Image (cartoon, helix red, strand yellow):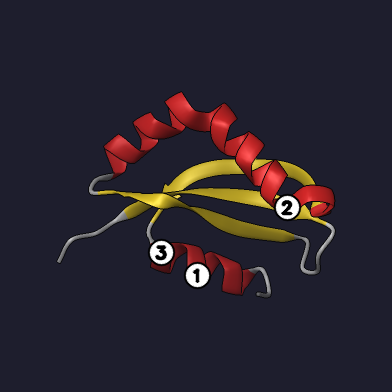
Amino acid sequence: MIKLFFITVLVVTTRMPADGWLQWTRSFNDHKTCIQSVGTTYEQISLSVRGHLGREFIKIKEMRCLTYQEAVELNVELGH
């Protein structure tokens, strides 16, 4: 089975629960390539997340590479 990784951003918003993981739409076939992409696209993704969330955006806490299921599990832990 192929394991896909996505750039995933932990954001703080005015929504409740305030913290949540958002996943970028582009997938990567391996963790290393995903991590390298974070390094080269961090600012672009940050600006896109801010634009997407608008006034609800407070800050980005973290950006990492996760599978879809990992992000789901982390969001469940946060109360989503």
Q: Indicate which disc, 2 or 3, sits on the residue closer to the N terminus.
A: 2
Marks 2, 1: nearer the viewer: 2
Q: Which residue is mark 1?
A: 72
**Relative to 19, is 66 on the left or the right?**
left
- Residue 18 at x, y = what percent? 78, 61
Callout 3: 10 Å neighbours few (<14), some, many (20+)?
some
Q: Secondary structure at mark 3?
A: helix
- Residue 66 at x, y = what percent? 41, 53
Q: Is residue 69 above or below residue 31?
A: below
Q: Residue furthest top?
A: 40
Point 66% across, 68% down: residue: 78
Callout 2: 10 Å neighbours few (<14), some, many (20+)?
few
Q: Which residue is mark 2?
A: 53
Point 50% across, 70% down: residue: 73
Callout 1: 10 Å neighbours few (<14), some, many (20+)?
some
Q: CA distance from mark 3 to mark 1?
A: 6 Å
Q: Are marks 3 and 1 in contact (CB under 8 Å)?
A: yes
Question: Please, what is the three-letter code of the amino acid marked with disc 1?
Answer: Val
Total numbered labels placed on residues in the image: 3
Question: Please, what is the three-letter code of the amino acid marked with disc 2?
Answer: Leu
| The C terminus: image quadrant | bottom right
Marks 2, 3: nearer the viewer: 2
Question: Please, what is the three-letter code of the amino acid marked with disc 3?
Answer: Tyr
Q: Residue furthest left?
A: 1
Q: Which residue is mark 3?
A: 68
User: Residue 56's image quarter?
Assistant: bottom right
Q: Is residue 3 above or below residue 60?
A: below
Q: CA distance from mark 2 to mark 3?
A: 20 Å
- Residue 68 at x, y = what percent? 41, 64
Between 47 and 10, the residue placed more toward the observer is: 47
